[in-house]
Image: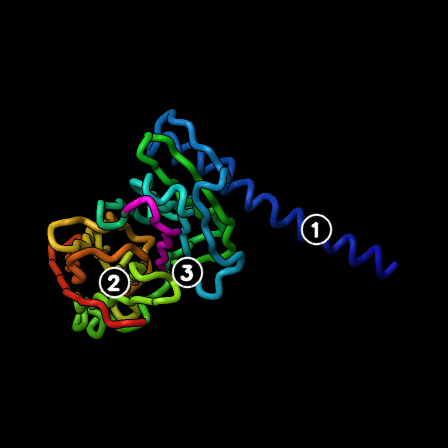
Amino acid sequence: MRNFVISAAMGLTALALAPLSAVAEDEAWPDIKASVFEDRTIAENDGTIALYAPEQAEDAAIVPISIHIPAPIANQARSVTLIVDRNPAPIAATFRFGDGFRAGPDIGERKLSTRIRVDSFSNVRAVLETADGKLHMASQFVRGAGGCSAPAGKDMDAALANLGKMKVKTLSNPAMGEKWREAIVMIRHPNFTGMQMDPISRGYTPARFVNELSVKRGDTLVLSMEGGISISEDPNIRFNYDAGADESLDARASDTDGAEFSAHSVPSGS
């Protein structure tokens, strides 16, 4: 009897979870795909790109994700579109890779990490476009809710006082190779979604978020981002690339209110 009860409970749990995944997969994605990629074919789970995210979000407003592009593909990478199916604005960000991201024939695996908001149990997708115009996708179902309406970690005055403070840190690691570098871009910004309620006025805080970022080495683009409301408060973006003759990086960002921010960095060691 006890085994039957356990089995029945497990079955009910599976039934309860299945519709949520099905809604994310079967209802939201086809419309998103048609809107963003039209009728283009997308190859899924073909080893061209990998996406890592927690199955259960500890905090739906700060969900860590990591995108990996294997060495044989890295030189062909042109852009990655990050999508959260059931978020109010599903396109979290589009990252574009410049010549500073790619390198010679010995380029290694590329990793790109950031933090996102998840508003409802949803598939998170990373769609890679390669130089031949083909699309490749990896996805992960994440259980989390309320990330887009969760209040900012600081009150509005504190958040706005630090808004735009920006830092770029670059690291080297001999164990990863002589030319291996990692950049960490940190921006102080509340990234208001327009869905967060002010506890005093009981009104909604207007949307204001980082929508443009570019990282260059000299005049050469390494990485750019077009961001949306699904990128978490205080955007943090890290990625690896190969060293060049100019070791410094310049990062520039702007938000939807037209404010502009910038930072400069040189390698600081591992």
Q: What amino acid is found at the position of numbered circle 3 in the picture?
A: Pro
In the picture of the structure, the residue carrying the numbered disc 1 is 12
Residue occupying image coordinates x 25% and y 63%:
185
Choose mark 2 or mark 3, whichever is in front: 2
Nearer-the-camera pick, 124 or 263: 263
Mark 1 vs 3, N-terminal side: 1
Q: In which quarter of the image is the N terminus?
A: bottom right
Within 10 Å of the Cα at label 2, are there few (<14), some (14-19), or many (20+) other Cα atoms?
A: many
Is 127 covered by the magenta stretch? Answer: no
Q: Which of marks 1 and 3 is in front?
A: 3
Q: Position of residue 251 (x, y in %)?
A: 17, 59
Disc 2 to disc 3, how far (Cα)? 15 Å
Report the disc number at residue 185.
2
Residue at the (81%, 57%) spot, across then down: 5
Check the picture and name the quadrant holding the C terminus: bottom left
Tell me the crowding category of disc 3: few under 14, some 14 to 19, or many 20 or more residues within 10 angstroms, Cα based. some
Disc 3 target residue: 64
The one of 73 and 114 positioned closer to us in this rendering? 73
Mark-to-mark CA distance, 1 and 3: 30 Å
Q: Marks 1 and 2, Cα distance to the nearest angstrom?
A: 44 Å
The residue stretch that appears in magenta? 104-114
Q: What element carries label 3?
A: strand
Residue 85 image offset from top left, x and y in percent: 42, 44
Residue 237 visible in the current orientation:
no
CB within 8 Å, label 1 to label 3: no
Mark 1 and mark 2 lie on one chain; the one further toward the N terminus is: 1
Instruction: Indicate the amino acid at tag 2.
Output: Val
> What secondary structure is marked by label 2?
strand
